[in-house]
Amino acid sequence: MKGPLFYAKILLFGEYGIIKDSKGLTIPYNSYQGALKTSSKQSDKSEKSNTNLVKFYTYLCKIDTKLITFRLTELKRDIVNGMYFDSSIPQGYGVGSSGALVAAIYDKYANDKITVLENLTRDKLLKLKSIFSAMESFFHGKSSGLDPLNSYLSIPILINSKDNLEATGIPMQKEGKGAVFLLDSEQVGETEPMVNLFMNKMKNEGFRKMISEDFAKITDACIDDFLHANIKSLFGNVKQLSKLVFSNFKPMIPKPFHKLWQHGIETNDYYLKLCGSGGGGYILGFTEDYEKTKNILKDYSLELVYQF
């Protein structure tokens, strides 16, 4: 048995802002994926995944049945038969490893599921988001539900606000010099402590003001520029965003990357921003000359996400 593939995701813009109801843009990232599989021969990896599925099953048994019901007998039988989630998505890297698993379980075992083939109205997207939020809370303590939503639908999603989502198109990639890339921090980040840190910072009036005014405004401008392929304006706004994140989210940026972050802002060779909650995992980069940036960052591991 092998289920359909569910891909990683990248939150291009909106990290932390979406918690406080500003815009976000999330896209599928097909370089990493996962699928439900069953095998009689268990490896350490598949055994660990199977054990986690047992715990997830217990959690799903208690989920609000008004929201969603699952074919739990079938799920339990498959887990007992050795089902596991075979995934290449790195965990703790901000690219949606738990989101892909949640999407896979919903797709295979949910009753009355909403499918990708339907006309995805705002109400349907919101219903899916609330189901996925309840499911993924098992992994993170609190979840927006956006990672599984992106993985399940495998299309870019524009988050206008908490209650206003829409499937969107992004400009076709070009064979240009500019790029969005991932920079591997080579350390695992944990979502929950980073979100708790952010929530504590939100108790400060100055920080709250910065989020609702500066951060939201610049994020919205970046999303607008990206969707309309206003590349020159995009890089100007991404630089502002990079500076703002560096000034206000330093604890979320792994220490060894502080100098690298600042270097990008000072030289305009590239700009870095958080990929997800930060604290480790991937850092997202934007550059107008990817070959030059690869050379500058030759001691680091980079992955191409999107070309301008």
Image (spheres, helix red, strand yellow):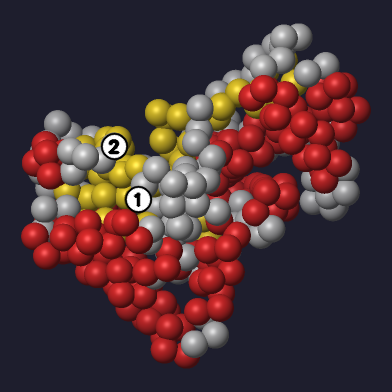
> Which residue position holds label 1?
283
Q: Residue at x 84, y 52 (%)?
A: 64
Query: Compared to 5, does 274 lie above or below?
Result: below
Q: Say the numbered circle drawn on residue 304.
A: none
**What's the amino acid at mark 1?**
Ile
Q: Residue furthest bottom?
A: 205
In what element is the residue under mark 2?
A: loop
- In-image side of 163 versus 292 (left or right): right
Q: CA distance from mark 1 to mark 2?
A: 11 Å
Q: Position of residue 210 (x, y in %)?
A: 38, 82
* Residue 69 appears anywhere in the view: no
Which residue in the structure is indicated by mark 2?
A: 301
Instruction: Choose top left, top right, bottom left or bottom right for residue 42.
Output: top right
Point out the tag, 1 or 2, that comes first from the N-terminus. 1
Give the percent coordinates (x, y) of residue 98. Answer: 61, 41
Within-10-Å neighbours for mark 2: few <14, some 14–19, many 20+? few
Q: Residue at 65%, 54% (x, y): give it.
A: 140
